Image (cartoon, rainbow, N blue to C red):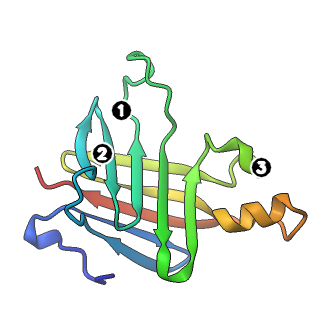
Amino acid sequence: MDTTPPETSGESFATVTIGGETFDFAPTGFVAERCDSDFFGGFWVLFTSGVTIVLPGDDWAAQGIDESAMVEANIEEQDLEWFADAGADPYGFAAGQSQVDSYVIDGNRASGTATFVERNATYAALGGGDAVVPVTGTFEAFCDG
């Protein structure tokens, strides 16, 4: 992946840093991709290059939208699937081990902090393997128009 987010070019991008390692994502042009900075008052990024970000708007509950804030980063070349999602209870980790801790939506840009767990590690823990180890990180996204 490109190590320099295209902030100055005006192109959509997302950057996720987990445990000190930064991963950059950009849209691939696939028709189902999304980068929507005003998704019912929230923020939604879905790039087939490996990132999903959903940040609820202030009035989502009033609109009947029951969705928690979440960030997923699929690092295919490392076979890692990091996610921060307090609503992902079936994976067998304690409250607070996987969640978006804070976020700010500012026009076409969103950023925040999160506590990530690695999906493959959660499967191993459910099978009696090592316990899930949460890792702190940050994220940023920019949607072009």
Mark 2–mark 3 distance (CA, rounded to whole Å)? 27 Å
Q: From the viewer's perspective, tell me whether residue 145 is left or right of residue 76.
A: left
- In the displayed structure, 65 sits above or below 113; it is above
The answer to whether the residue labelled 2 contacts the one labelled 1, judged by CB atoms less than 8 Å apart, is yes
Mark 3: amino acid? Ala
Q: Which mark's residue is nearer the viewer, 2 or 3?
A: 3
Mark 2: amino acid? Ile
Residue 33 horizontal/vertical position (percent) = 27, 53
- In the displayed structure, 103 sits above or below 79; it is above
Circle 2 crowding by C-alpha within 10 Å: few under 14, some 14–19, many from 20: many
Circle 3 crowding by C-alpha within 10 Å: few under 14, some 14–19, many from 20: few
Residue at screen point 38% across, 17% down? 63
Q: Nearer the viewer, residue 104 or 127?
A: 127
Residue at the far front in the pictured view: 31
Q: How many marks?
A: 3
Mark 1: amino acid? Gly
Q: Nearer the viewer, residue 26 or 94?
A: 26
Which of the two discs, 2 and 3, labels the residue nearer the N terminus?
3
Residue at screen point 44% across, 24% down? 65
Q: Nearer the viewer, residue 27 or 11?
A: 27
Which of the two discs, 1 and 3, labels the residue nearer the N terminus?
1
Residue 23 horizontal/vertical position (percent) = 40, 76
| Viewport quadrant of the N terminus | bottom left
Residue 42 horizontal/vertical position (percent) = 32, 36
Mark 1–mark 3 distance (CA, rounded to whole Å)? 26 Å
Q: Mark number for residue 57?
A: 1
User: According to the image, label 3 marks what residue?
Assistant: 94
Q: Mark number for residue 105?
A: 2
Residue at the far right in the pictured view: 128
Residue at screen point 11% across, 72% down? 8
Secondary element type, mark 2 = strand
